Image (cartoon, coloured by chain):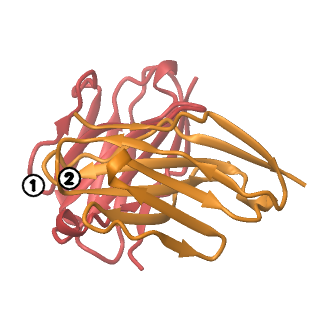
Amino acid sequence: AQKVTQAQTEISVVEKEDVTLDCVYETRDTTYYLFWYKQPPSGELVFLIRRNSFDEQNEISGRYSWNFQKSTSSFNFTITASQVVDSAVYFCALISYNTDKLIFGTGTRLQVFP
Amino acid sequence: GAVVSQHPSWVICKSGTSVKIECRSLDFQATTMFWYRQFPKQSLMLMATSNEGSKATYEQGVEKDKFLINHASLTLSTLTVTSAHPEDSSFYICSARTDRGLNTGELFFGEGSRLTVL
């Protein structure tokens, strides 16, 4: 069975604070992909990152960084120096090669206040 | 980059009518498309997976006679909500993938379609 858990339902921070969004996943497959998406109020999904199960290197893209740890089945997302425009719902998602279904976590609503 | 377009973006209909939502891959051939449903402040729930030329595979609990999915070409999949009722009001999003995407994990999402049934 596949499962994605985002334990944080809502997070509120003040601008310029760093914030980490947690994601824990479950899968029996050895080949899988993990994703993070941003969903602003308009509804469309904005792709942030895709990482395959064989690549545990952490990644940094501007103010965004991701920490992938297979040992703890986690794929956490950190926003450094948060901005008001970062306010959105963030979804972690998983698709495994064998089941071939993209499963989403319940999402974390991030509010960044000025 | 690859673009997936959904139409309409917004639709309001009366209870009992049927509504068709289109999902088009504009610059690539989508061998597989996924349809999701999202209620307000909730996550995206997979409804069905469709492969071009084949019948869609529905997730448990999704009524296949109510949510008709057609994937007749490599660039178009449609979701028809038949005899819509207010509880069908939701945000529907499609996702498309090429053959290569099965190995790379590359997926492309449409902008979503917001259905309101009065």
Q: Which quadrant does the C terminus of chain B fall into?
A: top right
Measuring from the top left, give residue B67's x and y in whole percent.
30, 32
| Among the 4 quarters of the image, the one containing residue B40 | top right
Q: Which color has been applied to chain B in this rendered view?
A: red
Measuring from the top left, give residue A17's x and y in whole percent.
79, 57
Where does label 1 land, which residue?
A: B53
**Camera sees residue A110:** yes
Residues packed near mark 1 inside 10 Å, few (<14), some (14 to 19) or many (20 plus): few
Residues packed near mark 2 inside 10 Å, few (<14), some (14 to 19) or many (20 plus): many
Q: Which color has been applied to chain A in this rendered view?
A: orange
From this view, report whether residue A72 is shown above or below residue B61. Answer: below
Q: Which mark is residue A44?
A: none
Q: Which quadrant does the N terminus of chain B fall into?
A: bottom left
Indicate the secondary structure of the residue bearing disc 1. Answer: loop
Q: Chain of mark 1?
A: B
- In the image: residue A62, left or right of residue B117: right
Q: CA distance from mark 1 to mark 2?
A: 6 Å
Hey, what amino acid is under mark 2? His
| Among the 4 quarters of the image, the one containing residue A32 | bottom left
Q: Are the residues flagged by discs 1 and 2 in contact, CB closer than 8 Å? A: yes
Hey, what amino acid is under mark 1? Gly
Q: Nearer the viewer, residue B9 or A43?
A: A43
Where does label 2 land, which residue?
A: B71
